[in-house]
Amino acid sequence: MIPLPRLAPPALGRVVRLTVVTLVLLVLAGGAALGGARLWVGRSAEIYRDAGAVPPREVAIVPGALVWPDGQPSPVLEDRLAAALDLYRAGKVRRILVSGDHGRVDYDEPNAMRAWLVRRGVPSGDVFMDHAGLRTLDTMQRAARVFGVRDAVVCTQAFHLARALYLARAAGFPAVGYAADRRVYADAERDAQRELLATALTLADTLSGRGPRFLGPPVPIDGDARASHDAWTRGLVAR
């Protein structure tokens, strides 16, 4: 057997250094790209932390989040709902659109969200339900294309607001944000890291013209909310 040539120690050291430098540059480039995407998406985002300062809008949009097996909203989702409730009680919005995942019979974010609001005095007829808010993109696209939303206040945590407002603009309606942060969340650091990647994917989705996974018959936001109460994702129109 012919022995394979071996790199001399100095040459091997140069290869290792070059590999390390290349990896570092790739990491830095990736970080810069994610940071740039975040800045681009966040430009001109109008975000409020005081309910009294929020300008009146047609509807509050509440993006979905985890619901526990007993049907109760997780802390993140409960705070989003509480923010929308603040605006409704203050007369800043007349309707609330709750949008979440109802892709299985045994998991139902929209009904859990509506039940939480109704228990606190919001008339059921003022709560519209989007059963196919599988992603923030779906929520905003369907708000425009199914519910005919013309302007809105988006109620979610601060880390999520810039992307949500960007997607609202991309869907064709102006929106402002009301930050729903009311406590320290257990997964806040992880969520912030995931949001960086989600923001980059959002740019790719909007540039490619990606639409919602499901559409369906119109349910005008200025009409009867009961038309939205019994739909289930499986019965909607897949794109």
Image (tube, rainbow, N blue to C red):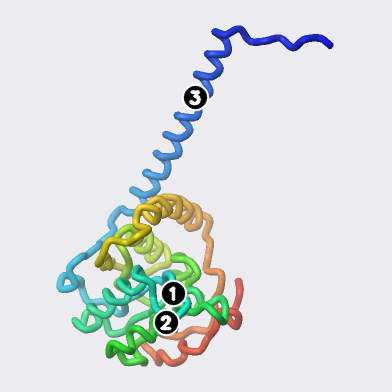
Residue 138 in picture, x, y percent from top left: 48, 69
Residue 153, quarter of picture:
bottom left
Q: Amino acid at mark 2?
A: Ala
Residue 53, quarter of picture:
bottom left
Q: CA distance from mark 1 to mark 3?
A: 44 Å
The residue wearing badge 2 is 112
10 Å neighbourhood of mark 2: few (<14), some, or many (≥20)?
many
Question: Are the two marked residues, 3 and 2, in contact with CB atoms closer than 8 angstroms?
Answer: no
The residue wearing badge 1 is 67
Residue 80 in picture, x, y percent from top left: 32, 72
Front one among 197 and 192: 192
The residue wearing badge 3 is 20
Badge 3 element:
helix
Residue 1 in picture, x, y percent from top left: 84, 11
Q: Residue at x 46, y 85 (%)?
A: 219
Q: Amino acid at mark 1?
A: Val
| Apparent side of residue 51 relative to residue 121 in the rendered image (left or right) | left
Q: Measured along the vertical axis of the image, is residue 219 above or below residue 69?
A: below
Residue 166, quarter of picture:
bottom left
